[in-house]
Image (spheres, helix red, strand yellow):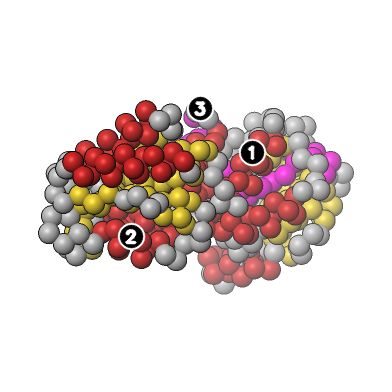
């Protein structure tokens, strides 16, 4: 695929994998992006998943006319990109791998001691001249692994951004970029907002016309919109005003309360998104919780604790650094309700969480008192 006279796409689409990283549903597949940069020397930028190694090598052959590349630049070591590199080394034993010291240690761990290759180690901020094409290496640790590096090509005003600005969905999938980019970001990188902020600051002075990520489309228009979303996401600000209601319900009574709350909120002109945690894609609900400024958790007490699907969800929120949000709670328990207390304790480690004063306590089924509590909760959320 043509990116420019000097940059070609040689990545692959994956429609076979059902769960990315063994946990994220990818109904529209995913792409593993790789590029070839043509200076006087030729550099391949990153590899692909090992199941697509042959297709990748064929794509490289097509754009190079069968001439062996001089370099392979490894910006990210994770196997969805690096696992094919053993085959690259086998095919192109004279190629030199360019990466950083941390990545080379990892390469030794992944490949073992018997795979040998030529290497050039670059430092943060260092430029490498390929002859009429330059790459400046900008370290971006923990976006998403510690060795991650961006590469900026000033001649092409192009940023090779590793996992940053990536998304789920292969290159044939449509739909708004932000939806699958948000789900990807919060699932994969969301915990590391501080590190993403640091990386974005390093890019601030670069003139960027194109972003070439390792997953999803090459971005070439309206880049400020994408960068602005990354700024919001990584600073844990809410992207939109609205309430996400995430619930579990065993016999339908908690669900009834959730439906009543959603109706009240909508009647008050609020944006509401409702998810049943036992059925919804948990990575989508996670991303939605970060997207909106308010979250309501509605669940039952179960085995003297929180219902399992809710417990898993809140653990995921905590693990991904959930913060800066207003949270309302609806609990249901037939004889010894503890869900509200347990959820409050679980979220107590999160920064800057404001619990609503209003809460709903259901004893088995929604009663008249609960209707008042639901109206109060809706009213309070509407004021936030
Ligand atoms: Fe696409 Fe962090 O690997």
Residue 196 percent coordinates (x, y): 63, 55
Question: Would residue 279 be seen by someone viewing this image from the given angle?
Answer: no
Q: Is residue 371 left or right of residue 77?
A: left
Q: Secondary structure at mark 1?
A: helix
User: Toward the viewer: 199 or 298?
Assistant: 298
Mark 3–mark 2 Cα distance, whole angstroms, equals 37 Å
Measuring 57% from the left and 43% from the top, which residue is drawn there? Answer: 166
Residue drawn at x 69%, y 64% is 100
Q: Quadrant of the N terminus?
A: top right
299 above or below 67?
A: below
Q: Is residue 171 magenta?
A: yes
Q: Position of residue 374 (x, y in %)?
A: 29, 42
Residue 27 — which label? none
Q: Residue furthest right?
A: 132
| Mark number, residue 226 | 1
| Image point (79%, 59%), residue name | 125
Residue indicated by mark 2: 343
Whole-number angstrom distance, CA of label 2 to CA of label 1 = 34 Å
Q: Please report the bounds of the magenta region as a residue range.
A: 154-174
- Judged by depth in the image, the label closer to the viewer, 2 or 1, is 2
Q: Position of residue 367 (x, y in %)?
A: 16, 42
The image shows residue 73 at horizontal and vertical percentages of: 69, 53
The relative height of residue 48 versus residue 346 in the rendered view (above or below) is: above
- N-terminal of the pair, mark 2 or mark 1, is 1
Q: Nearer the viewer, mark 3 or mark 2?
A: 2
Residue pointed to by mark 3: 174
């Amino acid at each position: 695929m043509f990116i420019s006279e000097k940059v070609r796409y040689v990545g692959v689409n994956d429609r076979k994998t059902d769960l990315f990283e063994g946990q994220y549903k990818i109904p529209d597949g995913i792409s593993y992006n790789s590029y070839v940069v043509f200076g006087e020397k030729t550099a391949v930028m990153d590899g692909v998943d090992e199941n697509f190694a042959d297709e990748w090598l064929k794509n490289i052959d097509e754009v190079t006319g069968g001439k062996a590349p001089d370099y392979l630049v490894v910006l990210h070591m994770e196997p969805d990109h690096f696992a094919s590199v053993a085959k690259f080394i086998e095919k192109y034993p004279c190629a030199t791998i360019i990466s950083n010291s941390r990545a080379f240690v990892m390469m030794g761990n992944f490949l073992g001691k018997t795979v040998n290759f030529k290497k050039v180690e670059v430092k943060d901020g260092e430029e490498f001249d390929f002859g009429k094409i330059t790459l400046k290496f900008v370290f971006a640790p923990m976006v998403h692994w510690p060795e991650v590096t961006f590469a900026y090509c000033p001649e092409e005003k192009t940023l090779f951004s590793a996992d940053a600005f990536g998304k789920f969905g292969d290159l044939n999938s449509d739909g708004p970029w932000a939806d699958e980019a948000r789900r990807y970001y919060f699932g994969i990188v969301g915990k590391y907002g501080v590190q993403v902020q640091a990386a974005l600051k390093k890019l601030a002075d670069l003139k960027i016309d194109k972003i070439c990520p390792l997953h999803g489309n090459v971005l070439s228009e309206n880049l400020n919109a994408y960068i602005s979303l990354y700024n919001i996401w990584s600073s844990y600000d809410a992207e939109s005003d609205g309430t996400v209601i995430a619930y579990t319900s065993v016999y339908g009574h908690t669900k009834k309360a959730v439906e009543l709350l959603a109706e009240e909120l909508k009647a008050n002109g609020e944006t509401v998104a409702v998810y049943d945690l036992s059925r919804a894609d948990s990575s989508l609900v996670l991303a939605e919780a970060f997207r909106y400024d308010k979250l309501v958790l509605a669940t039952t007490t179960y085995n003297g604790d929180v219902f399992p699907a809710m417990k898993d969800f809140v653990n995921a929120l905590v693990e991904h650094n959930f913060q800066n949000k207003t949270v309302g709670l609806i609990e249901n328990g037939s004889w010894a309700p503890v869900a509200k207390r347990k959820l409050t304790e679980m979220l107590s480690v999160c920064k800057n969480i404001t619990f609503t004063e209003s809460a709903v306590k259901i004893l088995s089924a929604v009663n008249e008192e609960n209707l008042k509590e639901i109206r109060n909760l809706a009213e309070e959320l509407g004021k936030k």
